[in-house]
Structures are given as structure tokens and as C-alpha cells.
Image (cartoon, rainbow, N blue to C red):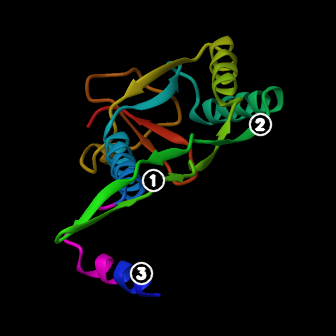
Amino acid sequence: MTEAAFTVNLIVTSSDCSHSYAMRRDFTIMAGLALLLGAAACGPLPVYYKQGTEVSRLQSDELTCATRALKDAPVANEIRQHPPIYHPGRKICSGVSCYYRPGYWVEGSIYTVDVNKPLRKRLEKSCMASKGYQQIALKRCTRRSAAAPAGPRLAPLTETSCAQRNRDGSTSIRTGG
């Protein structure tokens, strides 16, 4: 009983305020994910393009190819687990008395992977290429450049061409600006 009180008191009064490895790892993963998402929102936007094609035809072809790719390579989620991590014990001294805190294992986190996603993307690109489209990366439109509306057909690309993602998931290519 005395040992438990000593342990609780040691935890409360300990000058070791560092975070555990799992807490640091989780924070690092979340910070990296936020940075990656922030950078992805500013980077170029991949779009399919074939000059002179009607925008409605492009959207129809994209939907057809995505549907066909999903049929040929359906979502196949696999549950996986990161390996467990061992935290070795350490020596703790309080005044003249010392003791050893035992090591412990932390289970690896569980995550899901769609193993068919890369194949599905390749099938979609192949389908769009067979219809004469080419995948290009255009800079994202800013509010200023988004003022020039997209026409009913895909216009020739210029230095000021940009792309924006619409709320419905489709993309719009803007030229001029």
C-alpha cells in the first residue's frame, strides 16, 4: 500500500514532463498530415484535357471511366497493423534510493488500405487515354483568376490557364484571366 502512494506521489512530483513515444508519434503524424493537406491544396490539380471537347462530354467520359475502373478493380480494403513498439525500462532515483521501472510494449495502430486503388487509377487513366484525353497538372485558380468563366468547350491552354475543383467533385478549367 505504501508503494502505490509513493508511485502516485512520484508521478505527480516528477520533473520529467516529457510525452510518451506514442503521444509524440501521434502528434508528429497529425502535424505531418495537416502540412501535407495544406500543401496539396496549393499544388497543381491533375485534370483530363482534350482541346475542343465539350465540357459535358468530358464529365460524362470521366464518370464512365471511373465507373468502369471501379467495376474492374472494386474497393478491397485490408486491415493492417503497425508493429508493436517496445519502450525499455529506466532507472529512477529519488534522493539516495533508486529503483527500476520495467519496460513495456505499446501495440501498433490499426489502419485500412484499399489495395486496388493504384490499379483503379491506372485503369481510369487508360480508359481516358483511349478516349483521346491526356492527364495534365494545372495550377489551381485563385479568386482573381476564377473570374473568367469556363465555356461549353475546352479552350486551348495558355500560360494563365488554371483549374478548380467544384463542390460536386468535378473540375473546371479556366483560360485567360
Residue at 16% from the left image edge and 72% from the top image edge: 95
Q: Where 159 sits versus 78, above or below?
A: above
Q: Earlier in the sequence, mark 1 or mark 2?
A: 2
Q: Label 1: how many residues lie within 10 Å, few (<14), some (14-19) or many (20+)? A: few
Mark 1 secondary-structure assignment: loop
CA distance for labels 1 and 3 = 18 Å
Q: Residue 3 carries which label?
A: 3
Part of the protein shown in magenta: 9-19
Q: Which of marks 1 and 3 is nearer the N terminus?
A: 3
Image x and y of residue 85, in percent: 49, 45
Mark 3 secondary-structure assignment: helix
Depth check: give the residue in front, 96 or 153. Answer: 96
Q: Residue 76 carries which label?
A: 2
**For the residues carrying marks 3 and 2, which lies nearer the camera in this image?**
3
Q: Label 2: how many residues lie within 10 Å, few (<14), some (14-19) or many (20+)? A: few
Q: Please state which amino acid type lies under the numbered disc 2.
A: Ala
Tell me if residue 79 is in the magenta stretch.
Answer: no
Residue at 26% from the left image edge and 37% from the top image edge: 177
